[in-house]
Image (tube, rainbow, N blue to C red):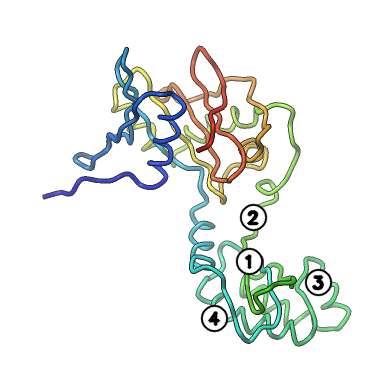
């Protein structure tokens, strides 16, 4: 007997937000009984139900690396004296990082050095070659000490492309509108389009989540991080399979944004 599928945490989070925003029941549709089922149904009292499919603008490689390096909570190495903030390449081999990083940081502590972008200290002391080669081979981009109540603590973060970490802050939210259509139309999201098409509903909602390591550029994620992020002024160029779209960031700050034909863009509260 095949067990009933339960909603994944991100699907349940989306369900709660749609239900709260619209004030109508939103129920699980995909129970695992067949392939290609959409995730949720919006149950209206005055018209047929709408279909919802949940997806994420997620950098899977970065999320997996971050979980492996930080998933067990605070990383404490008793051989180290200070606290360390270490930036690594998302493609770095996490097992090697876990095994070799403490020794590298111990060497830096012994030499009273940090690994910075300009590597000034390395050049000044004539130690650039061996240490920087080791760091680069390991996938370490930067390593900086900081004051901490937990000596030996290591916090690892990931080096992301500049366009995803900073940039121009626009007066409108049009960056979201112009980005989200091509995102839903690309080949990686063919399953989202197929499931909405198979639903056969008049209303077909794509709900896009933006986690901490999102693939969207800064101009898009910034809008969803800010409480005062401006709404787009133009309609999104959605694929034919989607009639409505929702966008919600995984950060503690910000609000969600959604678009519907006829009413356009609006905010919805983050729960």
Which residue is pictured at 66% across the width and 40% down the height?
Answer: 222
Which of discs 3 and 4 lies nearer the camera? The answer is 4
How crowded is the residue under tag 1: few (<14 C-alpha within 10 Å), some, or many (20+)? Answer: many
Quadrant location of residue 132?
bottom right
How crowded is the residue under tag 3: few (<14 C-alpha within 10 Å), some, or many (20+)? Answer: some
Q: Earlier in the sequence, mark 3 or mark 1?
A: 1
Mark pair 3, 4: CA separation: 24 Å
User: x and y percent of residue 205 in the render?
Assistant: 41, 27
Q: Which residue is mark 3?
A: 119
Could you say whether the residue bearing mark 2 is in a helix, strand or loop? loop
Mark pair 2, 4: CA separation: 23 Å
Q: Which residue is mark 2?
A: 160
Verify CB contact (< 8 Å) between mark 2 and mark 4: no
Q: Which residue is mark 4?
A: 99
Could you say whether the residue bearing mark 4 is in a helix, strand or loop? helix
Which residue is pictured at 59% across the width and 42% down the height?
Answer: 216
Verify CB contact (< 8 Å) between mark 2 and mark 3: no
User: x and y percent of residue 163 in the render?
Assistant: 68, 46
Q: Earlier in the sequence, mark 1 or mark 4?
A: 1
Which label number is shown at residue 88? 1
User: x and y percent of residue 262 in the render?
Assistant: 50, 12
Nearer to the camera, 47 or 169: 47
User: x and y percent of residue 174 in the render?
Assistant: 65, 27
Q: Earlier in the sequence, mark 2 or mark 4?
A: 4
Q: Earlier in the sequence, mark 2 or mark 3?
A: 3
């Amino acid at each position: 007997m095949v067990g009933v599928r339960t909603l994944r945490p991100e699907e349940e989070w989306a369900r709660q937000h749609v239900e709260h925003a619209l004030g109508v029941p939103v129920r699980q549709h995909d129970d695992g009984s067949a392939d290609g089922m959409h995730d949720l149904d919006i149950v209206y009292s005055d018209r047929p139900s709408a279909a919802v499919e949940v997806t994420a603008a997620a950098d899977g490689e970065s999320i997996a690396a971050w979980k492996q390096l930080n998933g067990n909570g605070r990383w404490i190495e008793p051989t180290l004296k200070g606290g360390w903030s270490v930036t690594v390449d998302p493609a770095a081999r996490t097992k090697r990082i876990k095994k070799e990083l403490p020794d590298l940081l111990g060497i830096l502590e012994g030499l009273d050095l940090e690994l910075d972008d300009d590597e000034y200290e390395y050049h000044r002391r004539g130690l650039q070659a061996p240490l920087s080669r080791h760091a680069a081979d390991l996938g370490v981009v930067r390593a900086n000490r900081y004051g901490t109540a937990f000596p030996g603590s290591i916090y690892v973060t990931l080096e992301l492309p500049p366009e995803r970490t900073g940039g121009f802050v626009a007066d409108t939210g049009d960056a979201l509108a112009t980005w989200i259509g091509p995102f839903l139309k690309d080949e990686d999201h063919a399953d989202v389009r197929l499931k909405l098409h198979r639903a056969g509903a008049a209303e077909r909602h794509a709900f896009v989540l933006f986690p901490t390591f999102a693939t969207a550029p800064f101009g898009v994620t910034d809008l969803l991080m800010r409480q005062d992020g401006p709404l787009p002024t133009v309609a999104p160029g959605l694929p034919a399979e989607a009639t409505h779209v929702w966008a919600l960031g995984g950060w503690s700050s910000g609000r969600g944004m959604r678009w519907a034909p006829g009413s356009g863009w609006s905010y919805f509260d983050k729960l």
